[in-house]
Image: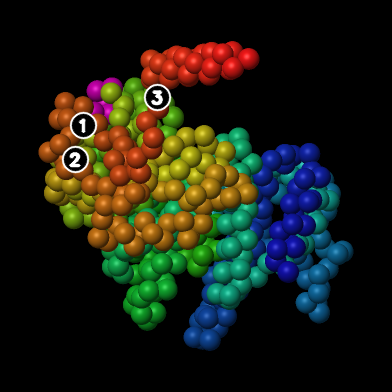
Amino acid sequence: MFEQTFKNIDDLLYKDAGADSELDYIGQTSWIMFLKYLDDLEKERADEAELRGEDYNYILDNKFKWEAWAYPLDKNGKYDHQKAIIGEDLINFVDHELFPYLSKFKNINQNNKTIEYKIGEIFSELKNKIQSGYILRDIIEYANELPFRTTKDKHELSHLYETKIKNMGNAGRNGGQYYTPRPLIRAMIKVTDPKIGETIYDGAAGSCGFLCEAYEYLYNKIDLNTKNLKILQEDTLFGYEKKNLAYVIGLMNMILHGIDAPNLIHTNTLSIDLKSVQEKDRHNIILANPPFGGKERPELQDNFDIKTSETAFLFLQHFIKFLKSGGRAAIVIKNTFLSNTDNASIALRRQLLENSNLHTILDMPAGTFLGAGVKTVVLFFKKGEPTKNIWYYQLDPGRNMGKTNPLNDNDLEEFVELQKSKPESEKSWNIKISDIDNNTYDLSVRNPNLPEEEALRSPEVILKEMEALDQESAKILDKIKSLV
């Protein structure tokens, strides 16, 4: 049922002149869904307060509650078409009253962990792009069918929302930056193996796939008592995200996965002063797929010991700084990081090897990231001890990767299992750091265990063989002539 509701909303957005891509579809769906979620949350809190014999103070004024403007009810609890705002009146209300009212919550409440602050963040950054008030009215009526009251409902909605995020990534443009294949995320989490009480951080959160999957991993693993659930909800998952739309999508994604007030901060991660980072700011586990190929301003680069304009290299320095001593990290990065010969790349590889145990490098096949024609690796490291040995694993699913053949969990099963013992095989090998050139610190992926293939013949050998064949042919012709 919910799947059809999402499809109906997309069909309506397609007809509207203001939304023209998957990015717009999910952004507009998100702010409407958030307000429906907020309405259900308020009702749930009011019911709980009533059971305790207490009054509940609603977050929103009456005029801006869902049932006042979005889905008014008559005295029998049925949708009241007469009270519903439609057409141009609806667009004017949303653009000039609702959004300005909600955006002020960011200024009223400075605690960025509260739902009130999240309301202000969302509506000060997003804009309503739906131009037809009649289409918006139809979308709202469909959105009203989406329930957020039970864990089962949220679970189903989260899967559908993840599908929308994946489709957005497949759609091209800049949507791919928000989607990391979930099978890869799950494998990275299995290797780092978070425990309850540890903090998990993603400073390039995007759609919060890493944080949502980490939540699922721990939720299915821990004893579900009140203490553990409180720790998991409030003190485990932390993220930063710079982009407006990504922040809103990530926030909604975490909410749908059951995290009521996500610790997701809307900020430029790379602007954080690394010199001021203290132990209390650091985390036990870092999981991330930072954007690569971006270029950062010179004044922002001054924040880092190793100066570079490459965004991914700045993020890697940030992650190393934000990891606790003994903390574990799994970071996706472009494979050229392993072999680039510029000074920044060499210095960063040296810093990583000297200050952390880079124990595993997972080499991903081309086509892993749909719409992005780049090769990537995953760096697994533990901070606080130098690297002595690196285990490489070259993932080969045995097929060409793409939209019709995406990465799946089975593809990574062998890697996750072999990573525990780090054996030598046709797909895996070990190298000693003492064997690496300490001038370049080149960590290129060169598999020494591939089956030997027949060596290509040199042109000289081919010419000699041709000459020998010519001579043999001439002898045969001479014999034939002698018999005639």
Name which residue lies at 57% across and 38% down.
Answer: 371
Q: Which mark is residue 162?
A: none
- Residue most toward the front? 483
Q: Are marks 2 and 1 in contact (CB under 8 Å)?
A: yes
- Quadrant in the picture for the N terminus: bottom right
Q: Earlier in the sequence, mark 1 or mark 3?
A: 1
Q: How far apart, in angstroms, are the residues tagged by discs 1 and 3?
A: 33 Å
Disc 3 target residue: 457
Camera-nearest label, 2 or 1: 1
Give the residue number, with chain letter if any, for mark 1: 441
Which residue carries the number 2 mark? 353
Residue type pointed to by label 2: Leu
**Vertically, is 25 above or below 414?**
above
> Going by the image, does 443 lie left or right of 86?
left
Q: Circle 1 — which element? A: loop
**Closer to the camera, 476 or 82?**
476
Few, some or many residues within 10 Å of mark 2 (<14, 14–19, 20+):
many
Distance from disc 2 to disc 3, alpha carbons, whole Å, reads 40 Å
Task: Measuring from the top left, give residue 434's x and y in whole percent.
Answer: 12, 38
Mark 2 or 3: in front is 3
- The amino acid on which the numbered mark 3 sits, given as a three-letter code, is Arg
Q: Which residues are magenta?
A: 342-347
